[in-house]
């Protein structure tokens, strides 16, 4: 775990957001998402305010809008579902461009699109400013169950090893005449998957025994003793507090 283990979504930038402790960013993202989810779908002004907050954080983190938009396409299946709702909904209907649309379905589609998009963008900003290693460390500091953090830690550490092993096995099959284009050769692929599982299991056993012999007690030592400062918690609370203020101002107006 000595390396940064940066995932494809991570952007190495020198910004205030990147310098915040990972647990601060995780809590801020969760609280912001909760505020967005509980906001009534009819409050369009509130969602505009949330979008402005996301844009401000992206600017501070030096994340380009085009980068966010490209990766936000992961929500397209949900957007396609939302498009169907105005046509399949019941109740009061309106006519637009010759099409009969359900008012409740339109609100439902907007609800899915607005809240889903804001949640995806907030998650992307978290991923863009935090390495996978720091995310796991932040979860550990937030007292996430050790079983989850330990599994994630080992998965992160050995994912590259297993990927390289699978690549070598594939090359070995190809050098012996394996052609994955033919359906009847799927047996070789299945055997390879089974062999990879056995190798991974055996490697895990050896690594675990080596760790126990070196004093492993069920929790990996922290790489450093630093924790989030009061100033970092205050900086991380800005966005959730502003989002809460927007929600309260719009709902209570």
Image (tube, helix red, strand yellow):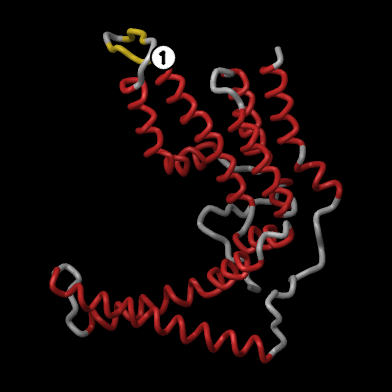
In this image, 68 relative to 81: left or right? right
The N terminus sits in image quarter: bottom right
In this view, 215 is above or below 179? below
> Which residue in the structure is indicated by mark 1?
103
Rendered residue at 60%/69% (across/down): 153
- Quarter of the C terminus within the rendering: top right
Q: Residue at x 69, y 83 (%)?
A: 216
Q: In the image, is 233 to the left or to the right of 200?
A: right
Residue nearer the viewer, 132 or 102:
102
- The secondary element bearing badge 1 is classed as helix
Q: Residues within 10 Å of mark 1 (few under 14, many from 20)?
A: some
**Residue furthest out toward the bottom:** 213
**Residue 214 x, y percent position in the rendering:** 70, 89
Residue that appears at 62% across and 89% down:
210
70 over 2 or under it: above or below: above
Q: x and y percent of residue 71 in the render?
A: 46, 44
Q: Is residue 103 above or below residue 246?
A: above
Residue 191 sits above or below residue 50 on the image: below
**In the depicted view, which residue is nearer to us: 174 or 107?**
107
User: In the displayed image of the protein, which residue is found farthest to the right?
Assistant: 230
Give the residue displayed 60% in from the left and 44% down from the top. Answer: 125
């Amino acid at each position: 775990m000595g390396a940064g283990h940066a995932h494809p979504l991570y952007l190495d930038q020198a910004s205030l957001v990147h310098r915040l402790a990972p647990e601060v960013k995780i809590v801020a993202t969760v609280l912001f998402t909760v505020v967005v989810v509980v906001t009534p779908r009819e409050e369009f002004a509130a969602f505009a305010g949330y979008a402005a907050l996301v844009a401000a954080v992206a600017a501070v983190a030096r994340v380009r809008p085009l980068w966010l938009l490209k990766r936000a396409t992961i929500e397209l299946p949900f957007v396609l579902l939302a498009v169907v709702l105005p046509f399949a909904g019941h109740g009061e209907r309106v006519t637009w461009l010759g099409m009969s649309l359900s008012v409740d379905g339109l609100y439902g589609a907007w609800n899915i699109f607005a809240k889903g998009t804001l949640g995806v963008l907030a998650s992307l900003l978290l991923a863009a400013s935090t390495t996978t290693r720091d995310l796991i460390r932040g979860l550990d500091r937030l007292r996430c169950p050790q079983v989850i953090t330990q599994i994630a830690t080992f998965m992160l550490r050995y994912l590259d090893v297993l990927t390289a092993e699978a690549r070598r096995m594939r090359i070995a099959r190809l050098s012996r005449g394996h052609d994955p284009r033919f359906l009847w050769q799927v047996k070789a692929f299945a055997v390879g998957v089974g062999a990879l599982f056995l190798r991974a299991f055996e490697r895990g056993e050896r690594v675990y025994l080596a760790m126990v012999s070196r004093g492993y007690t069920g929790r990996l030592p922290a790489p450093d003793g630093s924790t989030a400062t009061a100033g970092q918690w205050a900086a991380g609370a800005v966005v959730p507090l502003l989002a809460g203020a927007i929600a309260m101002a719009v709902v209570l107006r």
